[in-house]
Amino acid sequence: MYYQRERPVGKGLSTEEWKKINRKDKEAFVRQGRSHAILVYDDKTPVGWCQYGLRDELPRIDAGRGYRKARLAVDAEKLWRITCFFVDREYRGKGVAKIALHAALESIRKQGGGIVEAFPVVSKKMAAVPEWRWFGTPSMFRRERFKPVAPLGTSGLLMRRRILPG
């Protein structure tokens, strides 16, 4: 939900209240068709997830100081963003994120394509912390033909790729 809001929500609330608001808001976004994700399963067990969406669905990125500083013009009517991955601990290192990324790009292609942005972590220190791997790594995006555009602070990188409609 972090990237789906322009500003933080939940200041002064308990963790349980905050989670309740997030669940309610996420459900509303899904029902409105404003929340996109790829789920990866091992048989019937969900083992991975990748969030993506259009620029207006993930507005928080525009507020980031590093993004505002590095932002370059985009010449496409559709700007997509890949913001987050999660892979179950037992399935890490087995290609689940790669499958999720590939499926997200295929879904974007089927929805008319456009420019796709990614925000992987480049700092080895940060990448060693499991939470920072949620953004992906430059190498996984390079394998999918993303190109570096600009650094985002000291730990991130803005990468882009054009997806043709299909």
Image (cartoon, grey):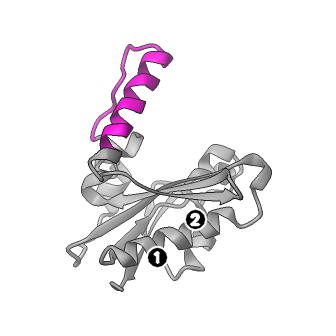
Q: Quadrant of the N terminus?
A: top left
How many C-alpha atoms fall within 10 Å of the one at disc 2: few (<14), some, or many (≥20)? many
Residue sitting nearer the eye, 117 or 17: 17
Is residue 51 at all visible to an observer of this figure?
yes
| Residue at horizontal 24 percent and vertical 55 percent from the top | 56
Residue 14 magenta-highlighted = yes
Counting from the top left corner in percent of width and height, residue 9 is at 33, 27
Q: Gap in Å between the C-alphas at discs 2 and 1?
A: 10 Å
Q: Amino acid at mark 1?
A: Glu
Q: Which residues are magenta?
A: 6-29
* Dominant secondary structure of the residues highlighted in magenta in the image: helix
Instruction: Choose between 63 and 80: the one closer to the eye.
Output: 80
Residue type, mark 2 in image: Ala
Whichever of callouts 2 and 1 sits on the residue coming sooner in the sequence is 2
Q: The C terminus appears in which quarter of the rendering?
A: bottom left
Instruction: Give residue 67's position: percent from left, percent from top.
Output: 35, 56
Mark 2, residue position: 100
